[in-house]
Amino acid sequence: MTTIAGEPVPRHGVRIFAIWLVLTAIAVPLIVLVLGPHLPPPHMTVESVDQRNANIVMTALLVPIALLVLVYFIYSFVFFRETTDAIVDGPPIKGHAGAQLLWIVLTSTIVLALAVWGSYTLIAGAHGAGGGQGPDPAAKPTGYQHALPVQVIGQQWEWTFRYPTYGGIETRDLAIPEHTLVAFHVTSLDVTHSFWAYELGVKADAVPGVDNIAYVNPRHTGLFQIRCAELCGLWHGHMSKKGRILASSAFQAWISAAQKKNASIVKYLPKYSRVYYPAPLRRAG
Amino acid sequence: MSRAARALAVAAGVAFGTALIVYYIVSYLTVSPPVVAATGSKPRVHLTLQTVASFGNPPHPDWVSYLARDPHGKWVHSTVLRVPAYSTVDVTIYQFDTATGLRNPFWGQPRGTIGGTINVDGKTFNVLNPDLASHTFAISDLGVSVPLKGVADNAKNQCSVAPCTLSEAHTTVTFSFKTGKPGKLRWQCFVPCAFGFPLGFGGPMQSIGWMDGYLMVQ
């Protein structure tokens, strides 16, 4: 107990700190060990695993801060509640240099540490980010020169895909091989779309005249959802389909079948290009 | 004017304004082209459509459009089509517009049709030169995509007002596809054919009843 104007007063600060410490000690391990594995995105690619780890770290750091605010709020609501009609000034609040310094140091450390950690994992990491990085990515994964190029072409209102290393064929379906670094080259023929393959950890804007590159390294076979994440017109909400990660042999069989299925149109396709806008632009109407 | 009269006038004005807003919203939400049913009965039905370069009538006489023929043989300005589930749909499209080419030549290959082919003026094709296409008929959820060959630019007797008649210059495209389970599927044209709009993607390309529609599979 301390005293104010001769009256004994509980040490509220110590109480709040103690409650916060106990709750934090319980919540953080729960978040890391129990909630963490279920945080988005799923773990279909190396990049999506990195993104989920980032989500775990961010959540684990944010929860103690949120708890501090909540504990202080609830504690104040319970213990500092005025139960009488009397309107009386509370004790004067005086500055506390130590507390202010601690607050500045602590928050600055958290923000700067996150900035350094985020920059390191993005730039110096060996995986790439999963997000679209424009035509000249800064975060290139190891072995990016040998990545399988897959062009993603947005158009109102459908996605199509070109495989320049397989004769430049174009398909309505997207399949990629597991354990193979893939470079998505995302572009558009008309308005801005956004190629969002949530389970892959990929989200890249499809902009006319821009080759937006995103790298992914699929970890295991399975289906993933493809959506457009940019409001692009009447059927924007229908611009979705399923993609597939296939075992290497299955991918080879799939691409061979796709080459046969689409053989008749290949001669009419424009030569593979990083962008197709503004040319060929034919008259409308 | 008394205070009561002024209050009454204000209340009447507010009520009138509110009614107008409600009328506008309800009209906007409920307006829809009529449903045109396919002719015939399950398991094989027939749809007959036409595409016109300019509708020629209000409210957008210069908009490109599809029309559908109802079971009574009357042309209806609608793109909401009803077909039975788990059936074969034979489609005939009378194409009255000139060729504009495909923005993405990929759509020059018929897909999702029975046999992977289409018939254009009596000849069977498994691919159409994209430069000769005028429009497409595509039901993405069924994997159906059909390029529609355009009328020659110098063709005589070209149609300018819908509905067009078979005495006017046209190509005839026929094909068949199968429907699956019941559902409301969207269909569209993949050619940016909206003359007068930026890159051809506005107006009729964004409007149900013109170059977009629904396939009601029931």
Image: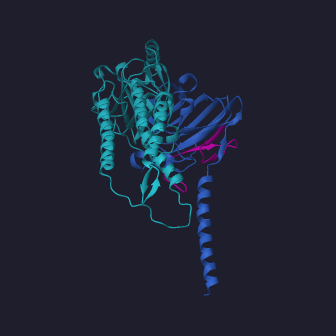
Residue A145: quadrant of the picture: top left
Residue lying farthest bottom?
B1
Q: Is residue B65 magenta?
A: yes
A255 versus A16 height, above or below: above
Residue A229 rendering spot, x and y as whole percentages = 45, 39
Q: How many marks?
A: 0
Classify residue B121 as left or right of residue A125. right
Chain identifier, colour cyan: A
Chain B shade in the render: blue
Q: Is residue A227 magenta?
A: no
Closest to the observer, A9 or B66: A9
Residues drawn in magenta: B56-82
Residue at image point 44% right, 12% down: A249
Classify residue B131 as left or right of residue B16. left
Residue A84 rendering spot, x and y as whole percentages = 56, 64
Residue at image point 54% right, 57% down: B59
A128 versus B191 height, above or below: above
Residue lying farthest front?
A6
Judging from the image, the colouring scheme is by chain
Q: Quick check: can you spot residue A88?
A: yes
Q: In which quadrant will I find the C terminus of chain B?
A: top right
Residue at image point 48% right, 27% down: A33
Residue A125 rendering spot, x and y as whole percentages = 30, 26
Q: Quick check: can you spot residue B150?
A: no
Closest to the observer, B209 or A72: A72
Residue A5: quadrant of the picture: bottom left
Classify residue B179 as left or right of residue A13. right
Residue lying farthest right?
B41
B140 versus A104 height, above or below: above
Residue A123 rendering spot, x and y as whole percentages = 28, 30
User: What kind of secondary structure does the magenta stretch mostly adopt?
Assistant: loop
Closest to the observer, A1 or A280: A1
